[in-house]
Amino acid sequence: MRFPLYIAKRYLFSKSGTNAINIITLISVISIIIGTAVLFIVLSGFAGLKDYNISVTSIIDPDIKILPSSGKTITITPEQEKKLAAITGIQNYSKVIEERVYLEYDGKTHLGFIKGVDQNYLKVTNIDTTLFAGSWPSIGEPEVVISIGIRRRLSLGISDYGNLLRIMVPKPGTGQITDPTSAFNRSSAVASGIFQAGESLDNDHLFSNIDFVGELLDYPLDKVSTLELKLTQDANEAEIRNELETIFLDTILIKNRTELNDALYKMLNTENLALYFICTLVLIIALFSFVGSIIMIIIDKKGHIKTLSDLGATLTDIRRSFFYQGALMIILGGGIGLFIGSIIVLIQQQFGLVNITASLPYPMRFEFLNLLIVYATILVLGILAARLASSRINNNFLTTN
């Protein structure tokens, strides 16, 4: 092994007698460096996007959300509340009532989605950090916090006690409606604040007190739409799920933050995988030129091959020499590409030179796992390419002058 490796090192750093071969070899190595760097940057970019989306959803989504397995409500008794509060790992929980509503203000109308929350809600989520005007509704007051989308559509200002927002919801029941004026529960509220929390909420959401929304919907005190839980850092989610299922039996569904955004994560993972394969395909194309350059080096070194054979080198040794040369080119090229890609990712993380919008830099996350994936990819593909190129050497090279 030492002899083929020694020859490979000599060939690696020596120039060919033909200038064209030197240029082609340089181009193939540069393409490997660029392809490796691009693949690492793409994976880091998608890791950053995933982190960004998680940071956005962490503002509005709880660690665990309990939903009804059927129907629209969960019945929670005082005894169940005591058991829920006693579960180890639950830091806080909040009762929530939510429903589609019809909004009317100053002759303008809009369909919205109201969430009535209790006083613990701000301990479960960080939705109050998205307020950019006004304040969160006071307990027991007919106040709502509206999204920026509702504010734009209704031209609704905050603290306008002279012109209240009308909120209407269809009355529960069956049968034909004979009097449209009595088909809705109605209430009025003042907007105490405006929030902006992302596209999923900004179009139609508004928040209020659970007692106000419960009265609007004619819900009894033991009926809620969902329960939202915040866990401690050392919480065991699997054990908490088991205890919740014991308390509520088969009446609930339990979802964590990832499950609540299942479609989003599937989309991100699918796009990440697709771009990985696309970039890998680009690397494979670049390796074709690499194989060609190795073969041309072999042809250029034909005289050297004959000399090595005359000195006692076997065909296997000679093939290994060029295989090791190609493998060393891949190891060095891939390493340089990863170094360049890492520098670019770290610079973007630190300084945000490339922006998605005027104020939002493109998110990047440096991950050693991505580093290993990219390096493993280039090594496997490159070594296969080097093996393919070195196998072109046959007995004709040993006998031809």
Image (spheres, rainbow, N blue to C red):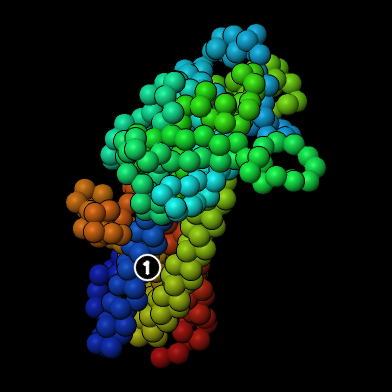
Quarter of the figure with residue 213 = top right
**219 w.r.t. 290: above or below:** above
The residue closer to the viewer here, 249 or 287, is 249
* Percent position of residue 284, x then y: 47, 72
Residue that mark 1 sits on: 35
- Judge whether 379 appears above or below 349 on screen: below
| Residue projecting furthest to the right | 175
Relative to the observer, which residue lies in front, 241 or 310?
A: 241
> Going 54% across and 55% down the picture, which residue do you hit?
267
The structure residue drawn at horizontal position 25% and vertical position 70%, both measured from the top left corner, is 13
- The picture places residue 167, in percent across and down from the top left corner, at 51, 40
Which quadrant: the C terminus? Answer: bottom left
Compared with residue 55, is residue 219 higher up or lower down, i.e. above or below? above
Report the amino acid beneath label 1: Gly
Q: Residue at x 35, y 64 (%)?
A: 38
Q: Is residue 347 visible?
A: yes
**Label 1's element?**
helix
Within-10-Å neighbours for mark 1: few <14, some 14–19, many 20+:
many
Q: Nearer the viewer, residue 1 or 144?
A: 144
Observer-nearest residue: 339 or 365?
365
Percent across and percent down for residue 295 are 42, 81
